[in-house]
Amino acid sequence: MIAWLVAPVMAVGTASILQAPGELDKYGGWIGISARATGFFHVERLGERWWIIDPDGHAFVSVGVCNVSFWGDKVPATGRMPYNETCRKRYGDIQTWARATIGRLKGWGFNTIGAWSNPQTWDKGMAYTVNLNIGQRAGGSWLHGTFPNVFSPEFERIADEVAKRACEPRASDPYLVGYFSDNELRWGPDWRSKKHLVEDFLALPANDPAKPQLIEFFTRQHTDIAGFNAAWGTSLGSFAHLAEPLVVEPGQGDAEARLRDCTAFQRLAAERYFAICEAAIRKHDPNHLILGCRFAGRSPPPVLEAIKGHANIVSVNNYSPDAPVRLLQGVHEAVRVPLMVTEFSFKAMDSGLPNTKGAGRPVATQAERADRFERYVTGIMQLPFVVGYHWFEYCDEPAEGRFDGENSNYGLVNVNDEPWEALIERMTEVNRRIYDAARGPGGQ
């Protein structure tokens, strides 16, 4: 369990929380609030508000940007990387680019490097996060919705191997905020597949390492094989037949009983995933925060129940046009730990990009992008459990489309490395007053 990384509530009076923001420390934390300095980022609830506390003991809101990449996106049809071509001409090498880019981001009021970013940005004096992609490395795919086989011993081995390689060397780095275990895993029916996880596992080949766990699960769910058959519309002779691949047809059996099985298995799989990931990370790095698995918007209640005790912060990616206040309130009510929005963005048609692929509906102009950003950030930061937001992404996608066809104006800069000035000007204003926004009325 990770409760020890969440410091006890400190007796901080309203007056101290309501001090006017002043100087920021080297991490971008606000020195107007002093808490326990541990040498690493941790989380505390002070009064009515959750905060990340930076290594020097000051209140920190993680204001980040995802995919800060020298390479940019590759156009599959041609192999070209338009942004990288610009960067090579302008900066020459990745280290020069990284120093210049970190300087830019600090000037725009950002203090954190988000997911998908180049490691060369991690040693330039800015806080950063690392996406471990444990499930992805174990055969899962966020893009295609393939869930990793968390019941296989191979999953545990890979989780440990990934954590040893990625976490152990960073265990003493004060600039590391923490780790995402994965990105946007599929926990059940969504835009990638209409199947429940248990249906995927039922269809696995004979002698798959998950099959004994599956048989044990169904023997707990049903008193006999007749109960399973009634729920799933099958005619198996015994639970042992579940060792063979079973493809079930939609609409068969007892819908309510079948859904109970799906929900229970969903929680079982999620509990195993989160427990294994936490154990692997903690084995190789006891110091840094576990930031969850970057949920894709709303997550099923059993999965939110399962993550409790295994993450210091729960991360949510959300591309709604307005601050997703009710969604975040629901997630927090379930998990009772602080939240970060770790992907959100807006795109505009005056960019010249198609904007036909990728999350969110485009707006007309960069000024509207700026308005949406301000409303979104102001809205979520009024919630006392939100401790950060990470914009997607640093550079626009190419007009020809990236690996999955996305071709949108998500960037702070275009492929010529030119900032979108109307957006950047507003972002800078909003980011620089974020501690005012976070304190809110009454210090909330």
Image (cartoon, helix red, strand yellow):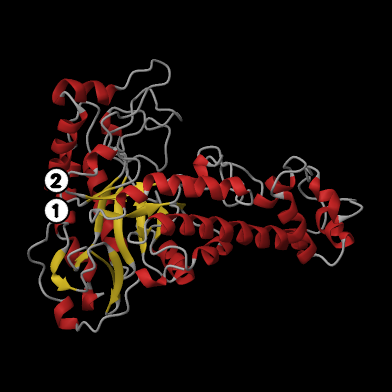
**Visible in this render: residue 20?**
yes
- Compare residues 280 and 252 and report the one nearer the observer: 280
Residue under the point 42% across and 41% down: 359
Q: What is the three-letter code of the residue carrying label 1?
A: Glu
Describe residue 88's horizontal placement relative to residue 133 as left or right.
left
**What kind of element bears circle 2?**
helix
Gap in angstroms between the C-alphas marked 2 and 1: 7 Å
Q: Position of residue 399 (x, y in %)?
A: 34, 25
Q: List the single residue furthest toward the left.
A: 23
**What kind of element bears circle 1?**
helix
Residue denoted by label 1: 429
| 118 in relation to 44, above or below | above
Q: List the single residue furthest toward the top.
A: 78
| 316 in relation to 301, above or below | above
Describe residue 64's horizontal placement relative to residue 25 as left or right.
right
Q: In the rendered structure, find residue 425 and report the number of the disc placed on it.
A: 2
Q: What is the three-letter code of the residue carrying label 2?
A: Glu
Q: Residue 14 occupies which quadrant of the picture?
A: bottom left
Q: Position of residue 59 (x, y in %)?
A: 20, 67
- Compare residues 36 and 374 and report the one nearer the observer: 36
| 241 in relation to 78, above or below | below
- Compare residues 260 and 278 and report the one nearer the observer: 278
Q: Residue 324 occupies which quadrant of the picture?
A: bottom left
Q: Position of residue 87 (x, y in %)?
A: 20, 25
Q: Residue 144 occupies which quadrant of the picture?
A: top right
